[in-house]
Image: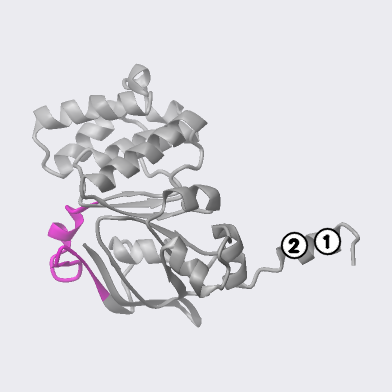
Amino acid sequence: MLQAEQLSKSFGNRVAVANLSLHIENELFIFLGPNGAGKTTSIKLMTGLLQPDQGRVCIDGIDLAKNPLAFKHQFGLVQEEPVLYEKLTPREFVRFMARLYQVPDQDAARRTEQLFELFEIADRADELIEEFSHGMKQKVALSGALVHEPRVLFLDEPTVGLDPKAARNLKDLLRGLVDRGTTIFMSTHILEVAERMCDRVGIIHQGELIALGTMAELREKTAADQASLEDIFLQLTGSNSEQDVTRYLGGE
């Protein structure tokens, strides 16, 4: 279980995240918000990349602040911009990640080949990462994050740059991981994908969690029985995009 309690973070006078509390267990949790709402900051707070001003985060009872090494062994992370050692090959990078997480070499080799086949990078596994496109780098980053079979997987815009087949494979993989007991925390701007995949949704706006629940619960909250996730998101975040477009195109 991933548990965040009263996480807060400010940068100067700007509050990026305010009193964020979440309990997420064995589900595919989608985290939504407009640009600048606090999504990426929240992920960084929950993975130890940023120090919170207050609050705490635990995985299966392991407190990040009290036992950071044990905590970090429990999760995998893929950021929107892949963080890779580009002078390595994909095979070298994933082997390096496996050893960081103390995965036995035989298990690491087997899992690496399975992941490379899944993401269709096996034929380029021994080329330098620096030669790859953004989408290919994303596939390498995903392989590195999954090789130790984490209890919790954090994904920040994971489908950006992926070709349609790889994106579909990723969606199927994530569903399969949840079925096997993994908790997935995923941020995305692609609301159609989010609606099809999610078990629950959290919406953050101006640093505050303003909605949390299943699609049925969110529809009940907004009194919109047939609303799409996009409709709910725009209603809750107060977007006036349709009026703005009409005005720009010379309407009323």
Q: Amino acid at mark 2?
A: Glu
Check the picture and name the quadrant holding the N terminus. Answer: bottom left
Q: Position of residue 42 (x, y in %)?
A: 39, 66
Q: Which mark is residue 213?
A: none
In-image side of 200 versus 110 (left or right): right
Secondary structure beneath disc 1?
Answer: helix
Crowding at dot 1, Cα within 10 Å, few <14 / some 14-19 / many 20+, comes out as few
Span highlighted in magenta in the image: 56-75
Q: Position of residue 200 (x, y in %)?
A: 39, 61
**In front: 213, or 189?**
213
* Among the 4 quarters of the image, the one containing residue 249: bottom right
Crowding at dot 2, Cα within 10 Å, few <14 / some 14-19 / many 20+, comes out as few
Secondary structure beneath disc 2?
Answer: helix
Q: Residue at x 22, y 39 (%)?
A: 97
**Residue of label 1:** 246
Residue 8 appearing in the image: yes
**Residue of label 2:** 242
In-image side of 76 versus 108 (left or right): right
- Residue sitting farthest toward the bottom: 13
**In front: 91, or 236?**
236
Circle 2/circle 1 CB separation < 8 Å? yes
Q: Position of residue 45 (x, y in %)?
A: 33, 66
Q: Residue at x 36, y 16 (%)?
A: 123
